[in-house]
Image (cartoon, rainbow, N blue to C red):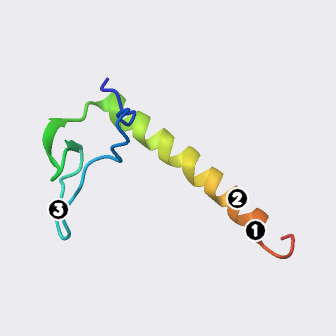
Amino acid sequence: MSDWRRSSDGDSGPVVPPYTKIPSGQKRGGNPAIFIEDLDDDAKVHIQGHAEKTALKAAGKFLKCLPINI
């Protein structure tokens, strides 16, 4: 699987111009973003799991900011 970490020079990732449509299952990179490769099933599962963990973490932080407990 590809290395998804950011580069050490502080690059924040690919720059996608407004209104650009990127087909599902593709990896893009660069400035401007260009096609790199089609994602394999392992990469798709990794991205899905990471997105779910990030969403849970964000929800927890949001709840801590509420003025009342719900």
Residue at image x 40%, y 35%? 45
Q: Residues within 10 Å of mark 1 (few under 14, many from 20)?
A: few
Position of 65 relative to 45 (above/below): below
Q: Is residue 42 left or right of residue 59?
A: left
In the displayed structure, 45 sits above or below 31; it is above
Q: Are marks 3 and 1 in contact (CB under 8 Å)?
A: no
- Looking at the image, residue 43 sits to the left or right of residue 48; the answer is left
Tell me the residue that label 1 is attached to: 65
- Hey, which quadrant is residue 62 in on the image? bottom right
* Residue drawn at (49%, 39%) of the image: 49
The image quarter containing residue 46 is top left
Quadrant housing residue 40: top left
Return the mark for residue 2: none
Query: What is the three-letter code of the residue carrying label 3?
Result: Lys
Residue at x 38% of width, y 37% of height: 6
Nearer mark to the viewer, of 3 and 1: 1
Label 2 environment density (alpha carbons within 10 Å; few <14, some 14–19, many ≥20): few
Which amino acid type is shown beneath numbered disc 1? Cys
